[in-house]
Image (cartoon, grey):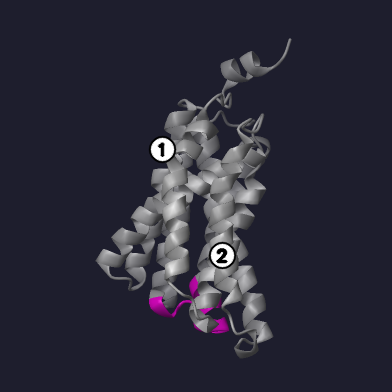
Amino acid sequence: MKKQPSVMWGVIAFLLYFASIVTIGLVVGVDYEEIGDSVETLTMGVIIPVGVGAAIVTVLVTAFGWWGPVLRDRARSRATWIILLPVVTMAISVYNITTVDFGAVEVSYLLVLVLAALLVGFGEELTTRGALLVAARGSMGEVGVFFVTTAIFAVMHSANFFFGQDAATTLQQVGLTLIYGAGYYVMRRVTGSLIPAILMHAFWDFSLLLSAKAGDVDPSIPTLGMLVIYVLTIPCVIWAIKGANERLGAAHEAAATPA
């Protein structure tokens, strides 16, 4: 690595990502409640600002030489049962999509939505459970890494307040993203890779936006799924962290390398 990991660099990556999205979002002026309405709102409200933010973090990760530890852990969690948490989350996404009337959705909209969702998944995961996670692993143990990356992931979503979302809804979303962030962290630990977390995140956002536009979701089903997620989150996170040997830095990397 060209730059030794330190939590400071992860916070800088987050601030640059956050600032670019808020600044560009305010300039283009797409209201948060309208962001999934059309190809134009998705392009102006998601693809352009998130694309710029993701590009900035990509440049930083490349300059720091962090792509190896950003994309994969040394070893994945041995507690394979913790995959239940991501599975339940993805089951809710699948349900959301099954309610969609695809005849009412233009192909062009679907393609742009796929791109937008992938960009959000890539940008947010690269920033938090990628660059920030690697940076934090150079400064603290895995418990601290989990709390720092999950908390900043939640704070990241306060940006929606600047785009017209009311304060109460924004606070609720920030609280919920603590739970979602825990699920994405578990997905990284159980697979040993950032890529599944990116895809899981993108699939979640895709299902929410698509079902909001052309779906007929029975709220009781996602609510039931969320109750299961609440029950699973704490034990899954504990076992995801348990036994992790992912601390970074010259001394820790040398200790983790077999003789």
Mark 2, residue position: 93
Q: What label sits on residue 217 in the rendered view?
A: none
- The furthest residue to the left: 168
Please, what is the dominant secondary structure of the magenta stretch? helix
State the extent of the magenta-drawn residues as a range: 33-45
Q: Quadrant of residue 202?
A: bottom right
Element carrying mark 1:
helix
Mark 1, residue position: 147
Residue beneath the point at 60% across and 33% down: 79
Is 19 left or right of 65, judged from the image as shown?
Answer: left
Q: Residue 55: x, y in percent?
A: 59, 56
- The furthest residue to the top: 259
Q: Quadrant of the C terminus?
A: top right
How packed mark 1 is, by other alpha carbons closer than 10 Å (few <14, some 14-19, many 20 or more), is some
Q: Is residue 35 magenta?
A: yes
Is 95 left or right of 31, judged from the image as shown?
Answer: right
Q: Residue 239: x, y in percent?
A: 52, 32
Question: Mark 2 belongs to which amino acid?
Answer: Ser
Q: Where is 204 relative to 233, above or below?
A: below
Question: Mark 1 belongs to which amino acid?
Answer: Phe
Residue beneath the point at 51% across and 48% down: 183
Is 223 left or right of 125, judged from the image as shown?
Answer: left
Element carrying mark 2:
helix
Find the distance from the CA under tag 1 to the CA under tag 2. 25 Å
Q: Is residue 88 magenta?
A: no
- Is residue 119 visible to us here? no
Q: Nearer the viewer, residue 153 or 239?
A: 239
Q: Nearer the viewer, residue 188 or 39?
A: 188
Q: Residue 93: x, y in percent?
A: 56, 64
Mark 1 and mark 2 lie on one chain; the one further toward the N terminus is 2
Closer to viewer: mark 1 or mark 2:
2
Q: Quadrant of the N terminus?
A: top right
